[in-house]
Image: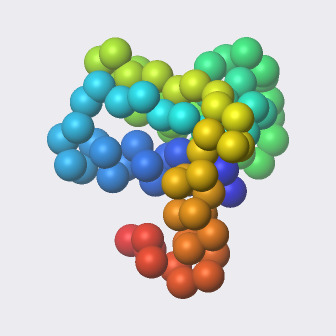
Amino acid sequence: MEAEAVKLGIHITQSAGYSPLILESDSQEVVGQIQNKKGSKTEIFWTVSTIQDNLARMSQSRIQHVRRECNTIAHALAVGKRSSCIFDH
């Protein structure tokens, strides 16, 4: 779920023409996989691979881990996504 949210955020950012991008996520596992710190062949492998490719094409873009307490806006958006599907594309 978190990896899909990152992928959607990159898609929206690229579509709007914004670059560079600093992504922040409170999921250490997803951030680690995207940064190649943790290899994985899990069900999110292809999503992570797509994210890595997209970030590589966006000059000076990166992802970094933040504590959940520092990520309240993203959390609120995620809760809204689950309850109302406002971001469906």
Q: Dividing the image into 4 quarters, which one contains the N terminus?
A: bottom right
Across and down, in percent, residue 83 comes to: 61, 82
Residue sitting at 58 percent across and 63 percent down?
76
Whether residue 46 can be seen here: no
Residue sitting at 62 percent across and 57 percent down?
75
Which colour style is shown?
rainbow
Relative placement, left or right, of 50 versus 70 is: left
Relative placement, left or right, of 27 versus 3 is: right
Across and down, in percent, residue 13 comes to: 31, 45
Reply above or below: 37 against 47. Answer: above
Whether residue 79 can be seen here: yes
Query: Residue lying farthest bottom?
Result: 84
Query: Residue lying farthest left?
Result: 17
Relative placement, left or right, of 57 versus 68 is: left
Reply above or below: 36 against 18. Answer: above
Residue sitting at 58 percent across and 25 percent down?
64
Relative placement, left or right, of 29 versus 16 is: right
Q: Dividing the image into 4 quarters, which one contains the C terminus?
A: bottom left
The number of numbered badges drawn on the structure is 0
Residue sitting at 40 percent across and 43 percent down?
10
Across and down, in percent, residue 74 comes to: 55, 53
Query: Residue lying farthest front?
Result: 69
Across and down, in percent, residue 35 comes to: 62, 20
| Quarter assignment of residue 65 | top right
Reply above or below: 31 against 10. Answer: above
